Amino acid sequence: MKITRIILNDYRNYGRLDMTVGPSVNILYGNNAQGKTNLIDAVCYGTGLESCRNSRDQDMIKFGQDSYRIEIIAEDDDGSTADLRVEYSLATDTKELYVDNIKVAKTAEYINVCNTVIFTPEDLKIVKSLPVNRRRFLNSLITKVSPTYLNHLYTIRRLSVQKNNFLKKLKFDQAYKGSGEMELNMLDFAIADTSADIILARYRFVLLLSQYAAEDHLLISDSKEELKITYNTISGCIDLLKAFLVENDNLTVYMSYGLSEGDYAKIKGILSDHILSRLQNARKSDIERGVSSVGTHKDDLTILINGMPAKDYASQGQQRSAALSLKAAELEIVRKFVSSTPILLLDDVFSELDSSRRQKIVDLMKDAQIFITCTDKEGSGRFFDNDVRYYHVDNGTVAENS
């Protein structure tokens, strides 16, 4: 799928924008603080409801206005079109989603229509910063190819909030102990069940990430570095999952196609029972702390370069290469599962790379529609052989030129 038109109303520093874009490489150039990243952010949010700046809806409205509107019109390989529209009103604090002018109630019905993969300098946080950044990256990837995973995330967040509220109440209100413990038991059953679904999805895609990112990193590093990614979750779960996959000889099937309904039910039951046991064993200490200590909310990825944790031992350049390898792997995985090349958004990424690494990254992006922000128009365009269109961005206005 490729975007053909972007329409904005009162989004960040854009009042009214209606622009047609090319099917190949679109370079958005201009001075800093003119709206290049805002335009990339509009595409990212308008397709996947993710802001590359992690902004609230209120922050996306142009100063002095009370609403915003993003509309993305795209065309698939078969010639069919998709019209995606997001509208937010500050007065009512409501956001409405439309697909082909039909209002949709569920986020999952919207975000899987047109996939984008974004590269930004902030992606370095995936490698070097807190676990929440790695979980966010992993969740974003899986959501792009599995709408049901988003439902699992919503469910576990709701259950976790409820459980923490009960734990806090139990900590300070002993009279509540009897009924509170019963409610916690019911919550733990539900949490264990949903956590098993999340772990099954995350482990599968971490295996795929590790495989694809390792191949991409060899290219980026001139075969000098070996990249590996491992998944850390509730103690004991990965051992159980590995044993099940080896015993049934279906690791390859699990990675490529997912487990059969019967096998999925079996291993989910095993994981769910184990997680429930862990939750119950932690009950006393959790009540004393007033917060749950066991769960997928603590999941993390370990990113290794030549066997050493990149977070602690890799140089800035190595960490940047690892982040790029992860994003390139995301592109390949999404393309594999949705049978359509995602749209690539590169926000000021080329300025962070030397000429050799720029070319290697370009080689990994063949056949994709690409949007690039930069200050150096010629410096970015020379890496692409195919049709390149240039757009000058100046104070919230966009003009195409050669």
Image (cartoon, rainbow, N blue to C red):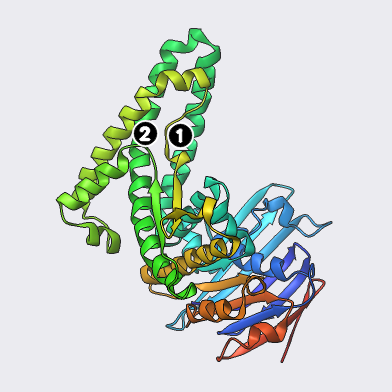
Residue 90 lies, with reference to residue 14, above or below; the image says above
The residue at the point 68 percent across, 84 percent down is 379
The amino acid marked with disc number 2 is Ala
Q: Residues within 10 Å of mark 2 (few under 14, many from 20)?
A: some
The amino acid marked with disc number 1 is Leu
Relative to the observer, which residue lies in front, 150 or 290?
A: 290
Relative to the observer, which residue lies in front, 67 or 304?
A: 304
The residue at the point 58 percent across, 78 percent down is 358
Where disc 2 sits, the SS reads: helix
Residue 290 lies, with reference to residue 328, above or below; the image says above
Residue 217 x/y as whole percent: 45, 69
> Is there CB contact under 8 Å for labels 2 and 1?
yes
The residue labelled by disc 2 is 190
Residue 357 x/y as whole percent: 56, 76
Q: Quadrant of the C terminus?
A: bottom right
Residue 370 x/y as whole percent: 57, 78
Which badge, 2 or 1, comes first in the chain's sequence? 1
Relative to the observer, which residue lies in front, 110 or 227?
A: 227
The residue at the point 71 percent across, 66 percent down is 38
Relative to the observer, which residue lies in front, 348 or 280?
A: 348
